[in-house]
Amino acid sequence: MSGSPSTAGVSTALLTDRYELTMVAAALADGTADRSCVFEVFARRLPDGRRYGVVAGTGRLLESISRFRFGDQELAALADIVDRSTLDWLADYRFTGEVDGYPEGELYFPGSPVLTVRGTFADAVMLETLALSILNHDSAIASAAARMVTAAAGRPLIEMGSRRAHEAAAVAAARAAYLAGFSATSNLESERRHGIPTAGTAAHAWILLHDDELGAFASQVKALGADTTLLVDTYDIRHGIELAVEAAGTGLGAIRIDSGDLGEMARQAREQLDALGATNTRIVLSGDLDEYAIAALRAEPVDTYGVGTSVVTGSGAPTAGMVYKLVEVDGRPVAKRSASKESRGGAKSAVRRFKPTGTAVEEVVHAAGSPPETGPHDRVLPVPMIRGGERVEGLETLEQSRERLRAALVAVPWEGLKLSRGEPAIPTVFA
């Protein structure tokens, strides 16, 4: 993913924690900085109640690594934190190692080696915070959004949570939701930066600005055409629908309802629109929707859902819980053993096994140099992403990642798509 006009050339080097640099400074001093290391990103467990996770943010991470350079301003900011020799090393720093990982849109499970970073200790440890901040945020959003897409059962969803998120996080959240299958976003910067379709017409303030509701509707139709979406719940919904059709005619594109008992309102609205002759006018629902509310509305005459707060906050799981752990030093496996925070030593890869019907059966995590026998339907998950510090050509586009996720969810056993609590959709086996 190339940099946008607002990010191209901007250093990402200070989007990190201080201890990354103090470790590098100490490693340079004691001679361990150049030891060959392997770091691994994985999640020990899925968020409570989740059956799968969605890998997202990899494209943003790779682009951010390319801008992880220390210019004069960054070095000046570190002058009181590290010594002169470390500053000189940072001035020449660029990541020169290798990265392999699960493609965006791939599913992950507990223990999946989502990202593997190889390089010297100093080279690779620098990327810990950058990798985790991007992958944890974007994967959490995409995982929640994918559940909403499943609950919507083919109906379009619009991401409209920018006002409930940090302004930079809102752009990343829009991208992650689109990856997961949302059809559009309200966020304009995400269109400029990532090419995501945008949608939106008017808020309640537009209605309140005018002396009467009909005047507001008529003005909007004049400006945007009869195919616009009119917000009908500022005052009385039934009267609002009547005025909306009066203003736009029976060719009105859509109405939006943002409050009340949404299921009941949708039923009544459909009956009223049909009675008025607006049989093709769509119904858009918004207002504190999450995957559970969307699932509850599945039988109602809804055409599109607008989702805000719940999607940009991961619907109760705002982080994917991924960690970045050193698993190999000079070819020797190393592992953390502290209670509840264990890691498995050694560089790893993974294979997902499938039935001939295409249903996923299990994920096999194995030592990188010892792949298991694979069947005709099995698939190796990690792919090369960076070699010699340079991004590998031909990685999937955002649109291709959307299709990857769609296919991955089709392959999940049906019980793994339930919104109820349960075990991961497929088990992880450590070979």
Image: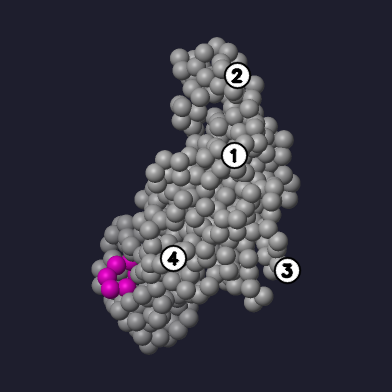
Answer with mark 3 or mark 1, whichever residue precedes in sequence.
1
Question: 258 or 26, which is in the foreground?
Answer: 26
To which residue does mark 3 refer?
376
Whether residue 169 appears in this view of the structure is no
- The answer to which quarter of the image holds residue 33 is top right
Name the kind of residue labelled 4 in the image: Glu
Badge number at residue 333: 1
The numbered mark, 4 or 2, whose residue comes first in the sequence reads 2
> Label 2 sits on what residue type?
Gly
Q: Would residue 204 be seen by someone viewing this image from the given angle?
A: yes
Mark 4 lies on residue: 423
Q: Name the residue type under label 3.
A: Pro
Pick whichever, 250 or 81, lies toward us.
81
Q: Looking at this view, is 131 or 307 the one in front?
A: 131
Q: Residue at x 63, y 27 (%)?
A: 35
Residue at 64% in and 49% down = 367
Instruction: Residue 31: give its label.
Output: 2
How far apart marks 4 and 3 lie (CA) works out to 27 Å
Q: Amino acid at mark 1?
A: Pro
Mark 1 vs mark 2, CA separation in Å? 20 Å
The boundaries of the magenta stretch are: 255-262
Give the answer, above or below, for where 356 lies relative to 168: below
In the rendered image, residue 268 lying in the magenta stretch gets the answer no
**Closer to the camera: disc 1 or disc 2?**
1
Say how many tags the image has.
4
